[in-house]
Image (cartoon, rainbow, N blue to C red):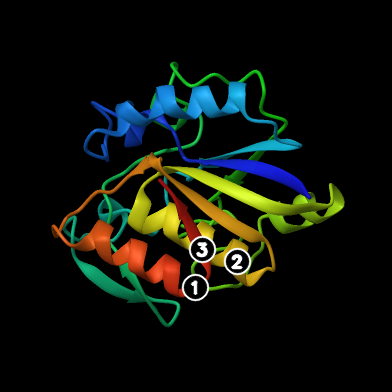
Amino acid sequence: MKKALIVVDVQNDFCEGGALAVPEANQIIPYINLIMKENHYDQIVLTQNWHPADHKAFASNNGRKVGETITRNGAPQFMWPDHCVQNTFGAEFHPDLELDRAAHIIQKGKNPEFDSYSAFQDNNHFMKTGLDDFLKFHEIQLVEIVGLAMEYSVKNTCIDAARNGYVTCLHFNGTKAVNAKPENGRDAIYQMIENSVTILG
């Protein structure tokens, strides 16, 4: 069974000091580097939030406050601070992440009208990223997933992977939650398990 590692959004803006820092995010980077080195993967894919400056998920572009939720294109849209803007330091991969084993980069959130948590598609399910085509081309059957943040991009990537027919595993030690509410990370784990995602301790 061919397997791939998907490393989700380990970018400066989601790490310590970033515009949208996930608590303890930097702690997962040595673990991710270790499994890339010690485990055999047929493919290693990095995902990268790659927002244009005028992205409509940014509170600043809607005259709203961070944390509000509005309706856009018929779906709820959370208002985020500006983050991972194309060609900025915040959008770059964290310098401690070892990139030499990665074969492919999937950039998401490029359309200013639609947010994109999952590495497979935008939140409105209008546009695919090409990740599924890449994995199927390389005959991948099993995916292991790590990265940031657990209850947003990681959860949605895991669930979409399982729904696309991949045996899907999340490395618990390779992800961290924002936990805006204390139960968010826990609830994300339950939701992933309910959607056939295996949690690796």
Choose the circle earlier in sequence order: 3 or 2: 2
Looking at the rendered structure, the secondary structure element under dot 1 is: loop
- What residue sits 42% from the left and 83% below the top? 74
Indicate the quadrant where residue 10 lies: top left
Q: Position of residue 19 (x, y in %)?
A: 26, 36
Task: Report if residue 116 is visible in the image.
Answer: no
Relative to 94, 151 lies left or right: left
Indicate the quadrant where residue 153 lies: bottom left
The residue carrying pointer 2 sits among few (fewer than 14), some (14 to 19) or many (20 or more) residues within 10 Å by Cα, namely: many
**Toward the viewer: 143 or 126?**
143
Q: Which amino acid does label 3 sit on?
A: Val
- Residue hosting label 3: 197
Are circles 1 and 3 on residues that touch, CB within 8 Å? yes
Q: Which amino acid does label 1 sit on?
A: Asn
> Which of the image's four quarters has the C terminus?
top left
- Residue hosting label 2: 162
Are circles 3 and 2 on residues that touch, CB within 8 Å? yes
Q: Where is residue 67 in the image (x, y as percent from the top left)?
A: 18, 60
- Residue hosting label 1: 195
The residue carrying pointer 1 sits among few (fewer than 14), some (14 to 19) or many (20 or more) residues within 10 Å by Cα, namely: some
